[in-house]
Each structure stands twice: as structure tokens, then as C-alpha cells.
Amino acid sequence: MKSTKKQRKNGKTIIVPPTGTSEQEKSIHIISQLHGIPEEKIRIDLEKTQLIISASKQNEIVMQKITVPLGSQIKQKKFRNGILEIILERPL
């Protein structure tokens, strides 16, 4: 899993959370560490080949973009103890 990265942009801090992926034949499993962020602040968007996990708090934006196969669909998502788990179903 990659470590947290921080960048400054337009007076805000952009935080890229540690995120890991593993791929199986029919699914992609994504785990992202979002400690200190309430579940209701987390947004998950799937746009063509980009899975975007984002949240904002004060002057910080937490964002991770992950490239996925076109036609992937979110099968399951779970958030517990600051860890977001997403399972994507691969296209047939």
C-alpha cells in the first residue's frame, strides 16, 4: 500500500491517502485508509475508467484516482475503522 502524499493547490492541501489494489479474474479489490474522515463525508464516483474516492474537511481535500477497466461496476463497499473497502466487478 502506498503512503500518504500531500500537495498544495489553490491554498488547499490535497491529500492522496494510502490505497492498495488487488485484481482477481472477476473482480478488483480496493482498500483505502481514510482515518479521521466520517463515512458521510466520503464520496465514491465511477466515471468510465476512473474510480474517484474523495472527501473534504476544512482546508484539505482527500482524493485518490484509480484507473479501472471500462465497464467495471461497484459490487460492494464497506467503511469501518477508517478503512474503505470497495469491490468492483470486472466487465464480462
Image (cartoon, rainbow, N blue to C red):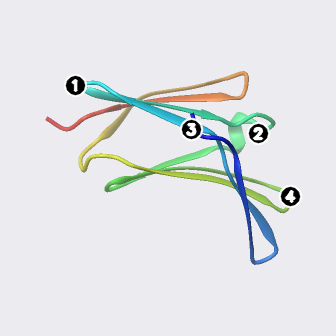
| Residue 9 to residue 14: above or below | below
What percent of the width, then of the height, locates residue 65?
A: 50, 53
Alpha carbon distance from label 1 to label 3: 20 Å
Residue at image location 76% in from the left, 34% down from the top: 35
Instruction: Name the residue that disc number 3 marks.
Output: 19
Instruction: Point out the image quarter for the N terminus.
Output: top right
Tell me the amino acid under the disc marked 4: Gln
Instruction: Name the residue that disc number 2 marks.
Output: 37
Instruction: Name the residue that disc number 1 marks.
Output: 25
Instruction: Name the residue that disc number 4 marks.
Output: 58
Nearer-N-terminus badge (1/4): 1
Secondary structure of residue under mark 3: strand
Secondary structure of residue under mark 2: loop
Residue at image location 34% in from the left, 46% down from the top: 68
Secondary structure of residue under mark 1: loop
Q: Residues within 10 Å of mark 1 (few under 14, many from 20)?
A: few
Nearer-N-terminus badge (1/3): 3
